[in-house]
Amino acid sequence: MPEGSVAHRAGARMCVVFALVACLAACTEGAPRRPDPSFSPQRQPEVVGFNDDPSRPYVVTAIDYHFHDAHPSLPIAPDRRLIVRNQGANTHNVSFPGTDFSENIKPGADVVIVEPGRLLGGPGRYRLVCVLHADRGMFGTVVIED
């Protein structure tokens, strides 16, 4: 096979790829693998990095077709101010089924709910809906603590 042939160049490339794979395998083969001590099948890792300050309003963000931070992992006090902020490009809506509360939110605007516990009827889990985009699954959950 002549040195400049296509087959020769392809063979040389395969040798380089093989050498790289062998080198990577050798570099990681002897490295000890330690299990993550925070994970076990019985105990899932907790979410890290969420800093909540109960003295400040709780903000739920409407963006695209999703409510960010409208989930049942953080109960809020009944008298804690709840802000729904539209950071998307579309007008959204905030409604709580079973109440008369329903307001549209233009892009860049906020809806402020001063006492969500009183509005929603006390402690519990409440569905938050964008009635404009419910067909796209734009729902969330607000939890009012005891």
Image (cartoon, grey):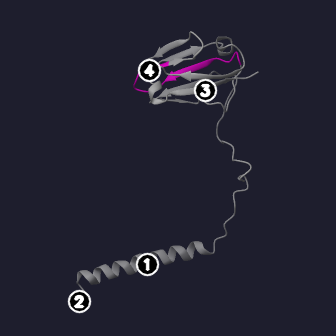
Question: Between marks 2 and 4, how big is the CA–CA gap?
Answer: 69 Å
Q: Amino acid at mark 3?
A: Thr
Question: Between marks 4 and 3, how big is the CA–CA gap?
Answer: 17 Å
- Residue farthest toward the bottom in the current orientation of the protein: 1
The mark total stands at 4
Contact flag, marks 1 and 2 (Cβ < 8 Å): no
Label 3: few (<14), some (14–19) or many (≥20) C-alpha neighbours in 10 Å: some
- Can you identify the residue that label 1 sits on? 18
Q: Amino acid at mark 1?
A: Phe
- Can you identify the residue that label 3 sits on? 141
Foreground: disc 2 or disc 3: 3
Asked if residue 80 lies in the magenta stretch, the reply is: yes
- Can you identify the residue that label 4 sits on? 132
Q: Which residues are magenta?
A: 78-93
- Can you identify the residue that label 2 sits on? 2
User: Left or right: 75 with respect to 105?
Assistant: right
Question: Between marks 1 and 2, how big is the CA–CA gap?
Answer: 22 Å
Look at the image and tell me whether residue 116 can be seen: yes
Label 1: few (<14), some (14–19) or many (≥20) C-alpha neighbours in 10 Å: few
| Percent coordinates x, y for residue 45 in the rendering | 69, 47
Q: Which corner quadrant holds the N terminus?
A: bottom left
- For label 3, the SS is strand
| Percent coordinates x, y for residue 129 in the rendering | 53, 22
Numbered label attached to residue 145: none
- Residue farthest toward the top in the current orientation of the protein: 100
Look at the image and tell me whether residue 87 can be seen: no
| Percent coordinates x, y for residue 85 in the rendering | 52, 22
Question: Between marks 2 and 3, how big is the CA–CA gap?
Answer: 70 Å
